[in-house]
Image (cartoon, rainbow, N blue to C red):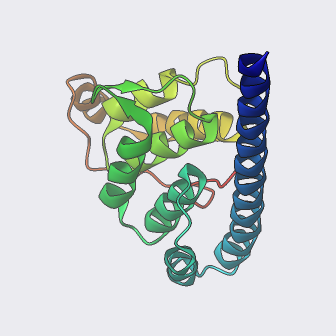
Amino acid sequence: MYQNHQTGSHEKVHFQQQTVESSRLSQQDSNVDELLKKVEQLLLEDAPDRALQLIAKSKIKSDWLKNATAVCQMRLGNYQVAIDIYRSILLTNGVFLRSDAPTVFKCNFAVALLLNKNIQGFDSALAAVRGADHPAISRLKTTVKDWKQKLTIWQKIQLVCGTHPNVPIELSFPPGDLH
């Protein structure tokens, strides 16, 4: 009888701990959402540097804020920094994209690779979101298709051989999405 009572008490304490933990996580999610709204507004105002400062001041640890940080870095032209951030949150065993990662992270990683002139990496990252539904996917495919159509035959051969032709890829949209 005593053991059952003790087990019941233990389960009650465990349940209370889970409730407190859930409440804390819910509050953190709320803080992240609030911060992302502010970051989004700053990005709309073309102020990625101020958005980075806001994220750094928050001291909140979240993959969503890492994504926002990488988006800011892309908009500042720091593509390799963005790539490194995405590698830290997306890659497993150093080479495979996490299947459970949000599609927007994978799309943003693809954009950073594209802007860093890594077409093969871009193609691989974009292949990882095949079948997923996100507006960035069609924008990216259209951008690359339009870019490839502008290449000369020699530049296309260069691309097939794995060398990036010295032709800039111009996005018709700001790089990176928060959601």
Quadrant of res 161: top left
- Can residue 175 be seen? no
- Identified at 66% across, 17% down, the residue is 131
Query: Closest to the observer: 164 or 8?
Result: 8
- Identified at 51% across, 76% down, the residue is 52
Image quarter where the N terminus lies is top right
Residue 39 x/y as whole percent: 66, 72
* Horizontal side of residue 125 vs 171, given as left or right: left
Q: Is residue 122 above or below residue 132?
A: below
Quadrant of res 174: bottom right
- Identified at 69% across, 62% down, the residue is 32
Residue 14 x/y as whole percent: 71, 36
* Horizontal side of residue 115 vs 138, given as left or right: left
Quadrant of res 156: top left
- Identified at 44% across, 72% down, the residue is 76
Q: Is residue 86 above or below residue 119?
A: below
* Horizontal side of residue 92 vs 64, given as left or right: left
Query: Closest to the observer: 108 or 96?
Result: 96
Residue 47 x/y as whole percent: 59, 82
* Horizontal side of residue 46 vs 157, given as left or right: right
Residue 168 x/y as whole percent: 37, 54
- Can residue 116 be seen? yes
The total number of labels drawn is 0
